[in-house]
Structures are given as structure tokens and as C-alpha cells.
Amino acid sequence: IQEYGLVVLGPGGVGKSALIINFQRGEFLEVYDPTIEDNYTHECIIDGENALLDILDSAGQDEYSAMQDHYIRGGQGFIIVYSIASLDSLNQVKARVAKIRRLKQTNRCPIVIIGNKCDLGEERRQVSYREGEAFAKKSGAAFFEASAKSGHNVADAFYQCIRQIRMH
Ligand code: GDP
Ligand code: MG
């Protein structure tokens, strides 16, 4: 069975752990320890081919952490998460994409950008769909708005990352 190493990155509180748990178990955990850093495995069939996903849930790293560099060097595909309710989180994501490019020394690394929490009401929204999409396009990344709470687009975003690795 083909194994794929995914790394989920993004600022604290955007829903990285919630997305992984929704993807793996189909449920939403309202509260998850923000300091827990863990590896999850998930077996599934994507486009008719078996895949074993090894997903790293990163936690508590600031932009300059050596640990984050280590994760990036070891990952094959990256899921980078911001919250549509936080413009600041999108700005932090921009720095992480730049860092992946730099450490991987390529412009064609498999990256999926997720604007999470799209279940929240429009009054909470600080990042428009177009803004997220335009940033992803500029970065050569795939883009989804998703919700770990409703499950909207969660599996699609993870699957898209695997497709990108396969095409890579
Ligand atoms: P992490 O620090 O990026 O791992 O974020 P968590 O997964 O711990 O989630 C942070 C907070 O956001 C928690 O209170 C979650 O319940 C909440 N949350 C995560 N995903 C969603 C979502 O899609 N919609 C909503 N409404 N809340 C979410
Ligand atoms: Mg977390």
C-alpha cells in the first residue's frame, strides 16, 4: 500500500486538529488540547487506489521554530489552514507557504490551502472566498473553504493533496 506523508500547518486555533479528526472519524470535537502534537494514520481509497495517509498535526510552533522546519523537510504534501474568521490567520499562512517553498526549494510542492470554519455566519467572516482563492492561485496551491464542524469539503481537501502528490 502506498504511503503518503501529510503535514498540517497553520496558526493556533484555526481548526487543524478538528479538521484531521473530522477527516479520520467523521466527528467534530468542540474542544481539543491545543498543545497536542500527534501523528494520525488513515487508510482510504482515492480514485480507486489504496492509500495510507500519515498525517502530522503540528501544534504550537511559531514561524521560526526549528521543529517546524523539520516537519516541512519531512513532508510530502502540505495542508495549510487559516480561519475565514481571522484575517490575521491568513497573513500567517502566507509566511508558511513562503517557508515551504524555501525549504523544499521548489515552486511545485503539493500544497492545499483550507479556509476553515466556513460554517460561521457571514458576520464573522474576515476573509472573502475570492481573497483566499486568489492567494492560493498565486501560490500554485489548491484551495477549499471547509468546515471541520459540518464536514463540508474536508475529505475533498485531503484527497486533493494526495492527488497532487501522485502527480508530482
Ligand atoms: P488548532 O489549534 O488549529 O488545532 O485548532 P482546533 O482544532 O483546536 O480548533 C480551535 C477552535 O476552533 C476549537 O474551539 C474548535 O471547536 C473550533 N473549530 C475548529 N474547526 C471549526 C469549524 O470548522 N467551525 C467552527 N465553527 N469552529 C471550529
Ligand atoms: Mg491542534
Image: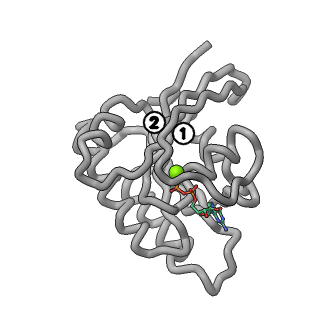
- Give coordinates of residue 138: x percent, y percent: 37, 59
Q: Which residue is mark 2?
A: 77
Query: Is residue 76 or residue 164 the one in the foreground?
Result: 76
Q: Which residue is mark 1?
A: 161
- Give coordinates of residue 17: x percent, y percent: 57, 49
Sooner in the amino-acid sequence: mark 2 or mark 1:
2
Residue depicted at x 73% and y 53%: 28
As drawn, which residue projects farthest toward the top?
A: 1
Give the label on residue 149, or none.
Answer: none
Identify which amino acid the numbered label 2 is placed on: Gly
As drawn, which residue projects farthest toward the bottom?
A: 123
Residue depicted at x 72% and y 57%: 152
Tell me the crowding category of disc 1: few under 14, some 14 to 19, or many 20 or more residues within 10 angstroms, Cα based.
many
Query: Is residue 53 or residue 70 the one in the foreground?
Result: 70
- Give coordinates of residue 23: x percent, y percent: 68, 43
Identify which amino acid the numbered label 1 is placed on: Cys
Residue depicted at x 62% and y 52%: 18
Q: In this orientation, does residue 52 appear?
A: yes
Where does the C terminus fall, quadrant-wise? top left
Q: In this orientation, does residue 155 appear?
A: no
- Residue 134 vertical position relative to residue 125 in the rendered view, above or below: above
